Amino acid sequence: MPQGLKKAGTKKKSVAAVKKLESRKLSKGRKIFSAKGRKAVGAKHEIATSKAICKKNEITASARAIGAGKKFFLQELKEKGDKENLKLKRNQIRVEKKTNTLSAKLKESLRKMGKDV
């Protein structure tokens, strides 16, 4: 090879650097390192939020499945789905009964003030 034209190889890593990288690789179990300190508080909050969202989605899904007439074998999910369906029906009936016209609102406010309408 002519002088100055040799291949630029990668820099050889030290034994300690290689060991450090290998010790940080996770082969089993959790795929990330757990947060420490201030980040741990935020991570716990995020985990709690995501669990609450998953729980609500699970209840909604079971309510839809039961409402569609599907047979459910998990008793706990079935009960939660029934409760969710009842809650939705109550809210719908409440909205349908209530009149939201301007005249109804004005009459209600007059009754609260003590005027007889």
Image: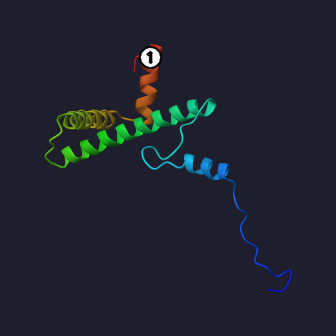
What residue appears at the point 45 percent right and 35 percent down from the top-left corner? Answer: 102
Query: 57 or 26, which is in the foreground?
Result: 26
Q: Position of residue 67 (x, y in %)?
A: 20, 45
Task: Name the residue that disc number 1 marks.
Answer: 112
Q: Quadrant of the N terminus?
A: bottom right
**Residue 20 picture location, percent across and down:** 62, 47
Judged from this view, the residue extending furthest toward the top is: 114
Q: Examine the rendered structure and indicate whether residue 75 appears above or below residue 29.
A: above
Determine whether the residue tagged by mark 1 lies in a helix, strand or loop. Answer: helix
With respect to residue 38, does 19 lie above or below? below
Query: Which quadrant of the view contains residue 63?
Result: top left
Q: In this view, does 17 lie to the left or right of 46?
A: right
32 or 69, nearer to the observer: 32
Q: Nearer the viewer, residue 80 or 103?
A: 80
Residue type at the position of mark 1: Lys
Q: In which quarter of the image is the C terminus?
A: top left
Q: Where is residue 107 in the image (x, y as percent from the top left)?
A: 42, 25
Tell whether 19 sits left or right of 30.
right
| Residue for point 34% across, 33% down | 98
Answer left or right for 29 relative to 93.
Answer: right
Q: Residue placed farthest to the bottom in the image? A: 2
Q: Residues within 10 Å of mark 1 (few under 14, many from 20)?
A: few
Q: Describe the colour scheme in one phrase.
A: rainbow
Q: Which residue is drawn at 45% across and 39% down?
A: 50
